Image (cartoon, rainbow, N blue to C red):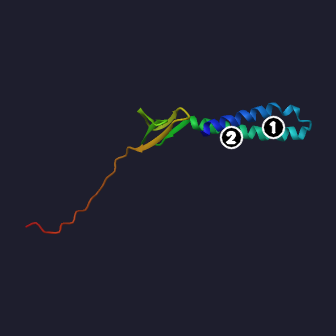
Amino acid sequence: MSFIVTLLTSLIAILIYLNTDKISSQKSRLVVRGITILIGSVAILHSISRVLVIVPPGNVGIVNFFGQVSENSLDSGVHFLNPFSKVLNFSIRLKDVKENIDLTYSPA
């Protein structure tokens, strides 16, 4: 959902920037252009960040797309994915589990 919102925000910012020629004051025109460039660039960077997914080292990523789990897992690194999918990270590191067992009786 946030991907669609950021795309719409960047589109609106571009349209406002293109229509700033109708503003009569030069100073106001520059201020509006600066604000629209700032808002548009932040929205575009956020959209790009939704497409790039980073799986940390020692983990695998499982892609979940509208409740459908992908058969392939993602290795650690940067991946390009559908912006509407979610990635669940699972650790694949080995863990040492040490247990202490106390006996209530002594073997004879």
Q: Position of residue 21 (x, y in %)?
A: 86, 31
Crowd band around label 2 with a 10 angstrom C-alpha radius: few (<14), some (14–19), many (20+): some
Which residue lies most toward the right here?
A: 24
Q: Position of residue 40 (x, y in %)?
A: 72, 37
Say if mark 1 contacts mark 2, CB within 8 Å.
Answer: no
> How many numbered badges does the structure rendering display?
2
Q: Amino acid at mark 1?
A: Arg
Q: Is residue 19 left or right of residue 88?
A: right
In space, the residues marked 1 and 2 are separated at their CA atoms by: 14 Å
Q: Quadrant of the C terminus?
A: bottom left
In the picture of the structure, the residue carrying the numbered disc 2 is: 42
On the image, numbered disc 1 is attached to which residue? 33
Quarter-of-image position of residue 8 = top right
Which residue appears farthest toward the front when viewing the image? 67
Give the camera-side residue of 72 and 100: 72
Q: Nearer the viewer, residue 98 or 49?
A: 49
Q: Which amino acid type is shown beneath numbered disc 2?
A: Val
Question: Can you tell which quarter of the image residue 39 is in?
Answer: top right
| Residue 16 x, y percent position in the rendering | 79, 34
- In percent of width and height, residue 3 lies at 61, 37
Which secondary structure lies at badge 2? helix
Res. 27 in view: yes
Residue 57 visible, this orientation: no
